[in-house]
Image: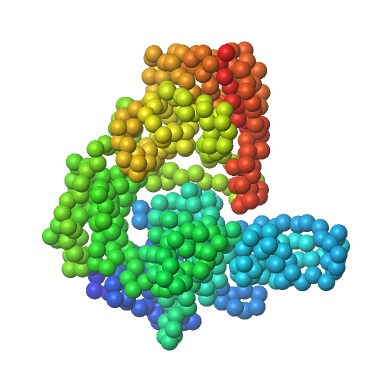
Amino acid sequence: MPSDPSPAALTTPGHLRFSTNLPFVQDLEQAGGRVVRQPTGHLVFYRSDGRRFLATDPEGNPLQECEWGTDATGNVVLCRARVRLDWDCWVGLKPAGLVNETSFSLASKRGWQLLKADDLRAMAAQALHVPIEDVRFFYRDEDLLLEAMGRATIRQRKDAFYVLQDGGFERVSFMSCMGAMNWSSIDFLPVVELFKSLLPGTGSAVFELIRGLYDDQNEGKTSVRPLRYRGIPPYPSEAAFRLFSNFFTPQAPGRNDPFTIFMNRERSGQVIWWPAATMPVRYFDQRAGACFTIQDNMLCKVTVASDPSGLSYVSQQGRPFVPYDRSAEVVGKQVVLKDRDRKTTLAVPLLQESLRETDGPAAMSPVDWRSVFVQGVPAILPVEAYGAVLLYPEDGTEIDEYSAQPFVADYIQDIGEQDREIGTVLSRAERVFIENGDAVVATCITFDRVRDYTVLFRRPAYAQKQAQQLWSVCAEIQQWDWLSHIRFVSDGEVRNQGAQGSYDLVYHWMPYDIADLSNNLDDQMKMISQMLRTRGHAFVIGPAHLGPRGLSQGLHICWEEPVEQLPTFRMHRTILPKAKLRGGLTLFHMKKS
């Protein structure tokens, strides 16, 4: 490590991307800036007003960058921020980057002319079943408009997250959002919506930023500000509680268990969160191409950017076995990474003096998650493996083929629990075939007993992520042998060998690239019919005119439903009102006569 990494942290190309921060590159002090070295060795660079604009690890590798400006009233506000993920991807934050408007008429309500902003808040609180104090957090007076003719307009502001294609905001893809925060004076803890779209490590990197700004804002105060979780509507989850607990310490009223209170949607806001004495800190090692996460002198996680599995190595502390059998151990002055029987040793001079040794080797699970791939795991680029999440446009751009799949799979899963007929179809199936459902394989698999599943995939990165999810489910329920009955294949010829008339249930997503080709649709329907046994069932997703083609192949249509009318998609539109699917996309439930 250089004796003073500060100059390199500022001058290395790509470390500072916001134009307002570039003056600090030439001369930090002359530009009014300063740098503070934290007890962990990490560096935080500040503007003259005490706002951080860059944070790095001890070697000057960037972790986050902030762009500050002023609003119409002259108050300092966070304009944008970038956070670096463990595998070298950057995620962008734009406060209030997503604004949705809802308009409705109150003209028929007696005395509407006398309504004030707080009256509209009270109405919203009653409709959403949340305290009015929470509504005040997210809806300012200027977000609640009542026009002369009794028409009310409510603006909902959300902080938006983006995948930064080249590390900056020049090329971005919308990723997710959360309730708009007051970044200049943090006063609550948020939960991200569309959490399944988050790139690996996003939550921790964002909370690293939140905790850093929170500490800056409370420095020198005799008492720090307590925080509570707030959301409209609230989305408490076990994952959110674990994330919060890494950076803040929960305190429940009375002698109640904080986790129990937090998981109650009506009481989650009663838990008070205080700054934790220790929190995760990250160190990048450019030589090893790895990121090390340390908390309280213990190694928590190691992420290798070049790993085609898209998975991190984690400590086995407190676990019977580590997720996916990928463990990170401290042995002497080395970090040992184990992927089942494969071992990699890293020498990390920067961390040698601070890490405690790991207690004993990690136990190995009975089954490798890769075993479901009949022909072996296909070649996958690391960036594709880590980036195998489903993204949804915030505007009216058409949702892509794979991102549309969960609306159908989740709906089928839901009605399987609610509708006796569909539940019987799913539970009685012995042999199931899933084709081109690469983003939802795990959702299509029912974990109540052993069944034979064959999965024909087109997108290896998504298929790999689903295989890993299946391993996690089997690990949780301790049914390892079920994995041996799940086969992932990529070769269409494998599907045809001995498949005729042998499946009880087929899930089939028509690829978008053939959905408008008449002959290909006929061929696909013929193939589905041939694969099904007599009285077998199929869920087929494709264009609206697909029905008659199924009938010509002996497939009776039990019912059909436009995907845009499914409650799962309508729920998605409550988050992104402009969401748009491919026109005519339809779910068919078919039965072979």
Q: Quadrant of the N terminus?
A: bottom left
Quadrant in which residue 246 is drawn: bottom left
Q: Quadrant location of residue 317? A: bottom left
Please say if 44 is above or below 157. below
Q: Report x, y in % for residue 303.
A: 31, 53
Residue pictured at 47% horizontal, 62% vertical = 262
Extreme left residue here?
A: 332
Rendered view: 290 above or below 146: above
**Any part of residue 103 in sight:** yes
Q: Residue visible at 56% across and 31% down?
A: 420
Tally of numbered tags: 0
- Image coordinates of residue 327 in percent, x first then y, are 24, 50
Residue at left 39%, top 55%?
Answer: 201
Expressed as whole percent of the image width and height from the top left, the position of residue 562 reads 65, 33
- Residue 151 location, quadrant: bottom right
The answer, for residue 306, to whether it is visible in the render is no
